[in-house]
Image: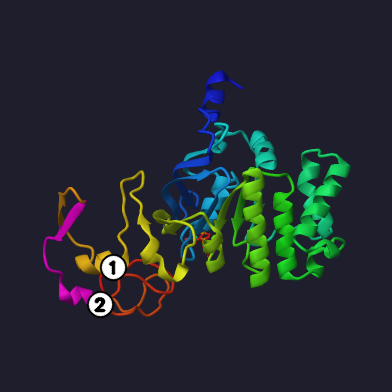
Amino acid sequence: MYGDQRQKIKIQPLPEHMALQALDIYHVYGMEHQNKVVALKGVSFDIKRGEILGIIGPSGSGKSTLLLSMGGMLKPSAGQIIFNDGTDITKLPEEEQFSFRRHNIGYVFQEQNLIPFLTAEQNIEMPMKLIDVPRAQRKAKVKELMERLGIWHRRLHTPTRISGGERQRVAIARALANNPKLILADEPTGSVDSDTSIQILELFQELKDETKTSFLICSHDPIVGEYSDRTLEIRDGIIIGEHGLGLDLSNLDSSRLLVIDNQNRITLPEKALVGLKGSLLYTWELKDEGILLKPLSQKDEKLEQKIKFCTSCGAEIKPGTYSCARCGAKLTRIVR
Ligand SMILES: Nc1ncnc2c1ncn2[C@@H]1O[C@H](COP(=O)(O)OP(=O)(O)OP(=O)(O)O)[C@@H](O)[C@H]1O
Ligand SMILES: [Mg+2]
């Protein structure tokens, strides 16, 4: 490889405490002449070493796209994804990317993707085989993980002969097999009962403390919010807010920190929009305490009455609100 190409792949290593930095990630689905979907619209964030970072957002907001991009399984249309050692995964040639992934990243997919003709035990062993871990070490790791996740008694069963929750635990054990620095998990508690969810999240917490593993987890499950050190809120491919430890999904407005992203965008919460009378023109003034926004004109009442149903999912919209309670889509006009 030529020197200048190599420079682009390896940038400055990140500070010791950071696992990953994503900068201005865009992802557009659809080839030329097809309908295009811009699933990520300039997303920037970082993950610290030994941190559980949650991602929440309505269906279709870009969570899975974001996760797949972080692991190099989807090549973002633009942006950089830099790991702690300075590797930009978006710039790696395919072969090097496979190897980087196998050594550094573990995945738990929304649809578990286990190999159907291998036993649970063989599925978990597979990532270790791919990086030539010696047999005895592989067997010991499989046993340790399966016991920790309470599925050792299922080791000889193929994925179709175990329950959905057990399959999920096999998928998690497989993701952890190579002691990756980063685990990407899409709805890891989606198909398990609440006791198993707690068991999985407690295991994640132990690993983050023991080995400084970092976790990026997409989920609709309130319990994931409780176990995440931080949670990012994504809407329509944009990160609109951030929450600290112990997130309460039913009351996001109380803990949301607003994000002004790298594109200088800010998404105002429902309460602020209602106070400001919706999206119109404002004058603004920089004050010592913050920014003062004042609506420039009164809203056209007739326009405000038009929206009764969400334009994204069709659910009825509660009067006096600016967003859909079912899918989270933002409306541009208040409903009366
Ligand atoms: N392969 C694809 N081709 C075209 N569009 C896609 C593809 N995959 C996802 N999309 C679109 O990109 C957007 C983001 O999808 P994504 O799967 O990332 O959402 P999500 O937040 O994970 O949703 P869910 O909570 O339902 O899993 C959606 O509008 C979706 O329809
Ligand atoms: Mg998804």
Label 1: how many residues lie within 10 Å, few (<14), some (14-19) or many (20+)?
Answer: few
- Amino acid found under the numbered disc labelled 1: Lys
Q: x, y (%) of residue 37?
A: 45, 56
| Residue placed most toward the observer, 243 or 127 | 243
Q: Residue lying furthest left in this view?
A: 297
**Circle 2 SS class:** loop
Residue marked by disc 1: 271
| Residue placed most toward the observer, 20 or 36 | 20
Q: x, y (%) of residue 130?
A: 78, 42
- Amino acid found under the numbered disc labelled 2: Lys
Is 292 in the magenta? yes
User: Which residue is found at the position 24% from the left and 79% from the top?
Assistant: 336
**Circle 1 SS class:** helix
Residue 324 to residue 294: above or below:
below
User: Is residue 108 visible in the rendered structure shown here?
Assistant: no
User: Is residue 333 visible in the rendered structure shown here?
Assistant: yes
Q: Is residue 83 left or right of residue 128?
A: left
Q: x, y (%) of residue 9?
A: 55, 29
User: Which residue is found at the position 29% from the left and 76% from the top?
Assistant: 307
Q: Quadrant of the N terminus?
A: top right
Is 164 in the magenta? no
- Pointer 2 or 1: first along the chain: 1
User: Which residue is found at the position 71% from the left and 50% from the top?
Assistant: 176
Label 2: how many residues lie within 10 Å, few (<14), some (14-19) or many (20+)?
Answer: few
Q: x, y (%) of residue 78?
A: 46, 41
Magenta stretch, residue numbers: 290-305
**In the drawing, what numbered circle is on residue 217?**
none
Residue marked by disc 2: 306
Q: Is residue 285 left or right of residue 132?
A: left
Residue 232 to residue 12: above or below:
below
State the image quarter where residue 119 is shown. bottom right
